[in-house]
């Protein structure tokens, strides 16, 4: 009975967190460039049930498995592109990614996790690998655990190395497809075991991994945390001083000829410009019939800078991104320019001036999923009510002596 209560309670908590993620997606279904969060319910590892066999050490004959509840798997933003819409607004710029399609896995790199695309197999020393590189074992903090590897479990009798979510597959005897070993080959534990509940490998597709293109911005938070962030929202605006800003009011950073953001520079729209388009196909300024450029590069005080800069994108491995707001993301859990710049690459995305990328939220499926979560929550609630009734009877009726 205790397991049933625990499973029902954990199910309700997981349903509540999943519903919050779905509600946030729905609320931002019309936010340009918004990336939906994928939330899923993950079963706790099943326990192998055995007949009690008194007089012998250990359990007896296996009679099946019992689920012990579910948990909300960490929400992961999906970076699939939203539909492009022609707006003919000269401050709108959409981005089209060039991310290759395929299976991706996270490996440990010099600046954190790096997405690699390719076939996942068993490499040297039985380690799960992609392109000859061992997969990174990711701990509860979302970072690679140094000196630990995911190794194929020799006791596993199944065929799949991993499940669809990157978690291990399990055979009929309850053996996981991979375990964790140190560099010396000693088994440290298995996924789901005490101390390893939140350890695993990260496997996905181009929708949630790989290099994607973003606009760099000079982020300023209400708490005073300033630095560099990135955004996909190309629905730009201008300040009273004609500085180009994103939807949150943060200045859009120009990039130089090498594709690196100019941290202390800004894009200032020229009020004397008489043309229609503000940005060329590569994001550069456009000149009108009077020879006026559509914008210029200035410093943070609005003074012209003698540098070559343009509106452009940077490529970022999305495994290193965490949401800051509606459409902005923190790179590598920091805003510090030096750390962020080390993780950026020259942008490969194609700019689409006069177009806008819509949210990638599927409203219909989101509402269907929300109804399913409500039904699941109510079912778990009824289970708890049933247990409550039974416990009440046990307390009030069992052992009662009739007068």
Image: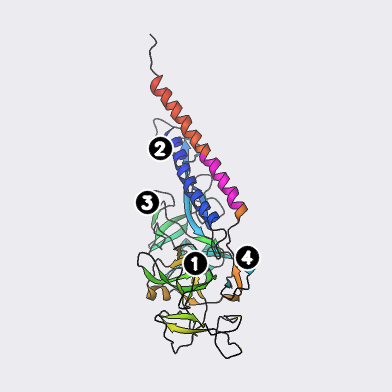
**Marker disc for residue 195:** 3
Q: Magenta: predominant secondary structure element? A: helix
Residue nearest the observer in this picture, 51 or 36: 36
Would you call the spot at circle 4 few (<14 residues within 10 Å), some (14-19), or many (20 or more)? few
* Residue located at (55% from left, 77% from top): 348
Mark closer to the chain start, 1 or 3: 3
In this rendering, is residue 131 above or below 58?
Answer: below
Task: Determine which residue is flagged by label 2.
Answer: 58
Callout 1 crowding tier (Cα within 10 Å): few <14, some 14–19, many ≥20: many
Q: Do residues under tags 1 and 3 come within 8 Å of each other at their CB atoms?
A: no
Q: For residue 1, say whether it is visible.
A: yes
Query: Which span is picked out in magenta?
Result: 365-377
Asked if residue 350 is positioned above or below residue 358 in the image, the reply reads below
Q: Which residue is mark 4?
A: 83
Q: Reading the chain from its start, which is encountered first: label 4 or label 1? A: 4
Distance in Å between CA atoms under marks 3 and 2: 23 Å
Q: CA gap, disc 1 to disc 3?
A: 27 Å
Mark 4 vs mark 3, foreground winner is 4
The reply to whether dot 3 and dot 2 touch (C-beta < 8 Å) is: no
User: Which residue shows up at 54% across the image and 45% down it?
Assistant: 373
Q: CA distance from mark 1 to mark 2?
A: 47 Å
Is there a contact, CB below 8 Å, between mark 4 and mark 1? no
- Residue 161 position within the rendered picture, expressed as x and y whole percent measured from the top left: 53, 56
Placement of the N terminus among the 4 image quadrants: top left
SS of the residue under disc 2: loop
Q: Which x, y percent locates residue 43? A: 49, 46
Instruction: State the separation of the CA atoms marked 4 and 3.
Output: 43 Å
Find numbered disc 4 in the image and state the secondary structure of the residue it sits on.
loop
Disc number placed over residue 318 in the picture, else none: 1
Residue 182, given in percent of the width and then of the height, sits at: 38, 60
**Which of 224 and 273 lies nearest the eye of the viewer?**
273
Label whose residue precedes the other's in the sequence (3 or 2) = 2
């Amino acid at each position: 009975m205790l397991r049933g209560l625990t499973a029902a309670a954990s199910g309700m908590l997981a349903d509540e967190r999943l519903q919050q993620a779905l509600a946030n997606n729905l609320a931002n279904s019309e936010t340009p460039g918004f990336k939906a969060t994928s939330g899923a319910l993950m079963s706790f590892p099943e326990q192998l049930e055995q007949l009690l066999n008194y007089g012998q050490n250990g359990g007896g004959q296996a009679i099946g498995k019992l689920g012990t509840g579910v948990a909300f798997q960490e929400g992961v933003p999906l970076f699939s592109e939203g539909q492009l819409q022609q707006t003919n607004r000269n401050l709108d710029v959409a981005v089209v990614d060039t991310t290759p399609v395929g299976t991706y896995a996270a490996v440990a790199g010099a600046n954190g996790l790096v997405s690699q695309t390719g076939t996942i197999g068993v490499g040297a020393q039985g380690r799960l690998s992609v392109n000859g590189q061992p997969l990174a074992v990711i701990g509860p903090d979302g970072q690679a655990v140094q000196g630990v590897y995911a190794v194929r479990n020799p006791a596993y009798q199944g065929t799949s190395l991993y499940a669809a979510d990157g978690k291990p597959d399990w055979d009929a005897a309850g053996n996981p497809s991979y375990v964790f070993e140190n560099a010396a080959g000693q088994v440290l534990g298995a996924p789901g075991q005490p101390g390893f509940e939140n350890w695993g490998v990260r496997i996905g597709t181009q929708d949630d991994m790989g290099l994607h293109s973003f606009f760099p911005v000079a982020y300023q938070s209400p708490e005073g945390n300033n630095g560099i962030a990135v955004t996909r929202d190309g629905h730009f605006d201008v300040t009273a001083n004609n500085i180009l800003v994103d939807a949150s009011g943060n200045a859009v950073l120009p990039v130089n000829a090498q594709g690196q953001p100019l941290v202390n520079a800004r894009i200032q729209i020229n009020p004397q410009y008489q043309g229609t388009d503000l940005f060329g196909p590569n994001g550069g300024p456009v000149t009108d019939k009077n020879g006026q450029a559509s914008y210029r590069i200035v410093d943070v005080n609005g003074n012209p800078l003698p540098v070559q800069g343009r509106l452009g994108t940077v490529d970022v491995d999305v495994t290193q991104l965490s949401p800051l707001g509606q459409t902005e993301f923190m790179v590598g859990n920091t805003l510090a320019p030096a750390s962020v710049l080390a993780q950026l690459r020259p942008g490969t995305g194609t700019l689409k001036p006069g177009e806008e990328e819509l949210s990638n939220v599927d409203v219909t499926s989101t509402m269907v999923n929300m109804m399913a979560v409500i039904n699941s929550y109510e079912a778990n609630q009824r289970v708890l009510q049933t247990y409550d009734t039974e416990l009440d009877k046990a307390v009030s009726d069992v052992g009662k002596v009739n007068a």
